[in-house]
Image (spheres, grey):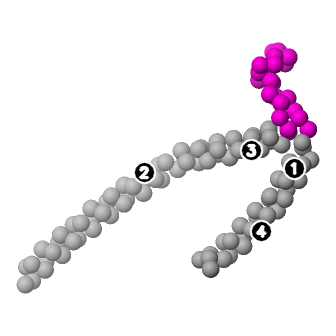
């Protein structure tokens, strides 16, 4: 059995309707759409790509998610750096405590 059944239920409640919506969107937007990368010459066939609309839609969604993840990761860099510094400091203090306990046990014997 799973450690977090509540988390699994919440994921199912969110992911199942999302999957249904995405499938319905894909079926409804199957018409081919042209994407031209040359704004001055729309007849340029070498820079024109044809695909169903949902492909462009999901591609834009994926690019947005990746871009958002990268920006978030970069913005949280200072927090990760602070956590590494705190962990290093805690490790140094732990080593000092162990050394002092060892020294104290030798003195008390």
First in sequence: mark 1 vs mark 3:
1
Residue 13: mark: 4
Q: Quadrant of the C terminus?
A: bottom left
**Region in magenta:** 31-53
Q: CA distance from mark 1 to mark 4?
A: 19 Å
- Which residue is denoted by mark 3 in the rendering? 61
- Which residue is denoted by mark 1 in the rendering? 25
Residue 109 appears left or right of 36? left
Q: CA distance from mark 1 to mark 3?
A: 13 Å
**Can you give x and y, in whole percent of width and height, for residue 5 in the image?**
66, 77
State the SS at label 3.
helix
- Which residue is denoted by mark 2 in the rendering? 81
Q: Nearer the viewer, mark 1 or mark 3?
A: 1
In depth, the one of 70 and 104 nearer the eye is 70
Q: CA distance from mark 3 to mark 4?
A: 21 Å
Asked where in the image residue 31 lies, by quadrant, the reply is top right
């Amino acid at each position: 059995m799973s450690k977090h059944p509540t988390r699994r239920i919440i994921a199912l409640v969110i992911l199942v309707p999302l999957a249904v919506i995405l499938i319905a969107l894909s079926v409804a937007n199957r018409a081919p759409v042209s994407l031209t990368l040359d704004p001055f010459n729309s007849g340029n066939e070498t820079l024109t790509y044809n695909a169903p609309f949902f492909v462009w839609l999901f591609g834009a969604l994926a690019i947005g998610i990746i871009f958002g993840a990268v920006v978030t990761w970069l913005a949280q860099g200072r927090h990760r750096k602070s956590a590494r510094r705190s962990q290093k400091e805690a490790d140094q203090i732990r080593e000092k405590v162990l050394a002092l306990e060892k020294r104290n046990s030798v003195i008390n014997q």
